[in-house]
């Protein structure tokens, strides 16, 4: 059970995009760029 506690709470299916953004700065950058393109 101790192994489970050490693992980061990374479950994109359950937690949604927030975790992806938080754990992967590159994804965050891509998404910001994408949103900016949508605005224009």
Image (cartoon, rainbow, N blue to C red):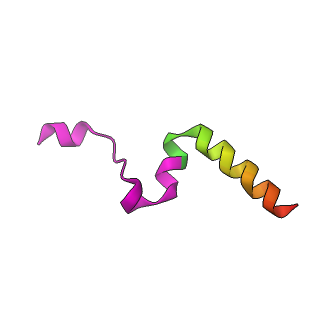
Residue 7 to residue 12: above or below: above
Task: State which quarter of the image contains the C terminus.
Answer: bottom right
Asked if 5 appears above or below 15 in the picture, the reply is above
Residue closer to the observer: 14 or 6: 14
31 on left or right of 12:
right
The quarter of the picture where the N terminus appears is top left
Q: Tell whether 34 sits left or right of 11.
A: right
Q: Is residue 40 above or below residue 19?
A: below
How many marks can you see?
0
- Residue 20 percent coordinates (x, y): 50, 48
Q: Position of residue 2 (x, y in %)?
A: 14, 38
Q: Quadrant of residue 12?
A: bottom left
Task: Please check the rendered image and state whether residue 7 is part of the magenta-colored stretch, yes or no.
Answer: yes
- Please say if 39 is above or below 19: below
Tell me the quarter of the picture where residue 36 sits: bottom right
Q: Nearer the viewer, residue 3 or 38?
A: 38
User: In terms of secondary structure, what is the magenta stretch mainly?
Assistant: helix
Whole-percent x, y for residue 10 in the image: 37, 47
**In magenta segment, residue 13:** yes
Specify whether 28 is left or right of 3: right
Residue occupying image coordinates x 19% and y 42%: 4
Q: Residue at x 59, y 39 (%)?
A: 25
Question: What residue span does the magenta drawing correspond to?
Answer: 1-20
* Front in this rendered view, residue 9 or 12: 12
Determine the residue positioned at 28% across, 39% down. Answer: 7
Residue 19 at x, y percent in the picture: 47, 51
Q: Residue furthest left?
A: 1
Q: Residue furthest right?
A: 40
> In the image, what residue occupies the spot 17% across and 37% down?
3
């Amino acid at each position: 059970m101790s192994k489970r506690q050490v693992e980061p709470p990374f479950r994109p299916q359950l937690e949604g995009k927030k975790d992806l953004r938080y754990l992967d700065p590159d994804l965050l950058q891509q998404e910001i760029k994408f949103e900016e393109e949508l605005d224009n």
